[in-house]
Image (cartoon, rainbow, N blue to C red):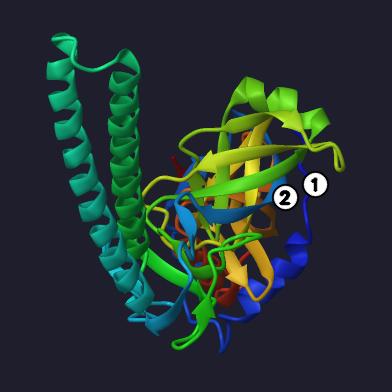
C-alpha cells in the first residue's frame, strides 16, 4: 500500500530545534547509539466504514398529560430534577372529584336498595305465579322491573368506578425513574383533559437506556443490513452499538431509512438530544494502524519517528479514526515500515547525534 510522505524535513527540523542548544560536548561523536525499540506497521483487514450524523434519544420517554379537568395545586419537582418511579409529579385540587364521588356513592346506595326491593317483589310474584294466582303478564312485568333495577345498579357501580378513576387522576406519579426535561404548567393553572387533546404537563426521560437514530440514504441500506455493525463516535471513544435495527420502510419525503442503534449501559458522556457521528460497516478494506503512544504532536502537526536503513527521521502523518488505543494512518507511512515505539527515546537519540555533529544514520533497532 502506497502512502505519501508529508514534510519530513520540516517536522525533523521542528523536533530537533526544540531540543537542541549549546555546543557539542567532547567525545559525544564517539558514543555508540542506543538500540531503539521498533514496531513494524502492517496493513490489516478492517471494515470499510461510512459516517452519518445521528441523534441520541432516551428509549423511555413520556409526556405526562392531564386526564381530568382540575387546577394544579402542587408541583413537587422542576426541570432537571431526578425522580424515582412512583414519585408524585403533579397534584391537583380534588374538590370537584371528591364531591362527584360522594354523589356517586349515594346514587349507588339508592340503586342497590331499589334492586333489592325489585328482586324481593319478583321472588314473591314468582311463587304465586307457580300456583296460578297471577297472570303471565304480571309475571313478565315484575321481571322487567327487576332487570331494570339491576341495570341501574350496575350503571351506578360503573359511575362510581369512573369517578374514582378521575379522583386518582388528581395525583400523577412517575411511571419510571428518570429526569424531568420539560414542565408545561405552573401551580394554580387550570388544565383540561380535552377535547381536542389532553393538555401536556411534564416530560420525563430515563437516562439509563439510550439509543441513536440515524437517517441513511437508500443506497447504503443493503450494505448496512449485510454487515450489521456500527460504532458511535464520542470524543476519542468508539462505542459499539448493541444492535443495528434498520426500519423496513423509507421516508416518502427524504427517501432515507431510519436506523436505530441501542447503546450499551456504559455509554458515559452521551445524553438525549446530542448529535453524534456514527460509523457503519459497509465493506472491507486494508488499513494501517499505529499505537497512539508512538505518535509525536507538535501543535497541529502529528508525526512518528521512522527507522530505516539511513537512520531515524521524524515524519508527518495524517490520521484517521481512533480504534481504541490504535490510530488509523491515512498518509505518511507505507506497509512494512518501522516506527520507534518510544518517541521520547528516539528524539533523545536524535538530539544527542545532532549535538555531537553526527548524522542520524547508523541507528540500530529491534522489534
Circle 2 residue: 332
- Left or right of 26: which side holds 105? left
Looking at the image, do the residues carrying marks 2 and 1 touch, with CB atoms under 8 Å apart?
A: yes
Label 2: which secondary element: loop
Q: Is residue 166 visible?
A: yes
For the residue pair 242 and 113, the one nearer the viewer reads as: 113
Where on the picture, by quarter, is residue 207?
Answer: bottom left
Q: Earlier in the sequence, mark 2 or mark 1?
A: 1
Give the position of the C terminus as an image quadrant: top left
For the residue pair 295 and 174, the one nearer the viewer reads as: 174
Residue name at image x 56 percent, y 87 percent: 23
Where on the picture, by quarter, is residue 258?
Answer: top right
Label 1: which secondary element: loop
- Left or right of 82: which side holds 115? left
Q: Is residue 284 visible?
A: no
Task: Give the numbered dot on residue 4.
Answer: 1
Amino acid at each position: 500500500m502506497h502512502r505519501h510522505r508529508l514534510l519530513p524535513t520540516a517536522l525533523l527540523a521542528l523536533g530537533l530545534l526544540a531540543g537542541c542548544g549549546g555546543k557539542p560536548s567532547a567525545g559525544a561523536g564517539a558514543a555508540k547509539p542506543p538500540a531503539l525499540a521498533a514496531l513494524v506497521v502492517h496493513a490489516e483487514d478492517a471494515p470499510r466504514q461510512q459516517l452519518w450524523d445521528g441523534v441520541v434519544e432516551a428509549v423511555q420517554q413520556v409526556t405526562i398529560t392531564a386526564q381530568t379537568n382540575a387546577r394544579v395545586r402542587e408541583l413537587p419537582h422542576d426541570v432537571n430534577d431526578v425522580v424515582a418511579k412512583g414519585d408524585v409529579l403533579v397534584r391537583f385540587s380534588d374538590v370537584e372529584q371528591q364531591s362527584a364521588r360522594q354523589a356517586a356513592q349515594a346514587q349507588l346506595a339508592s340503586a342497590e336498595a331499589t334492586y333489592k326491593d325489585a328482586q324481593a317483589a319478583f321472588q314473591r310474584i314468582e311463587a304465586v305465579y307457580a300456583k296460578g294466582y297471577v297472570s303471565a303478564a304480571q309475571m313478565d312485568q315484575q321481571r322487567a322491573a327487576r332487570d331494570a333495577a339491576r341495570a341501574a345498579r350496575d350503571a351506578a357501580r360503573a359511575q362510581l368506578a369512573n369517578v374514582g378513576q378521575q379522583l386518582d387522576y388528581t395525583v400523577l406519579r412517575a411511571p419510571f425513574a428518570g429526569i424531568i426535561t420539560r414542565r408545561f404548567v405552573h401551580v394554580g393553572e387550570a388544565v383540561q383533559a380535552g377535547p381536542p387533546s389532553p393538555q401536556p404537563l411534564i416530560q420525563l426521560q430515563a437516562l439509563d437506556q439510550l439509543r441513536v437514530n440515524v437517517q441513511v440514504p437508500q443506497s447504503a441500506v443493503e450494505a448496512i443490513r449485510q454487515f450489521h455493525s456500527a460504532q458511535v463516535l464520542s470524543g476519542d471513544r468508539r462505542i459499539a452499538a448493541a444492535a443495528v435495527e434498520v426500519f423496513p420502510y423509507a421516508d416518502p419525503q427524504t427517501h432515507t431509512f431510519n436506523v436505530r442503534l441501542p447503546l450499551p449501559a456504559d455509554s458515559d458522556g452521551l445524553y438525549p438530544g446530542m448529535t453524534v457521528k456514527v460509523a457503519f460497516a459497509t465493506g472491507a478494506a486494508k488499513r494501517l494502524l499505529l499505537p497512539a503512544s508512538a505518535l509525536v504532536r507538535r501543535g497541529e502537526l502529528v508525526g512518528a519517528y521512522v527507522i530505516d536503513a539511513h537512520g531515524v527521521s521524524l515524519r508527518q502523518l495524517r490520521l484517521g479514526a481512533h480504534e481504541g488505543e490504535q490510530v488509523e494512518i491515512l498518509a505518511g507511512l507505507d506497509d512494512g515500515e518501522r516506527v520507534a515505539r518510544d518517541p521520547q527515546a528516539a528524539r533523545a537519540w536524535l538530539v544527542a547525534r545532532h549535538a555531537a555533529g553526527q548524522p542520524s544514520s547508523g541507528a540500530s533497532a529491534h522489534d
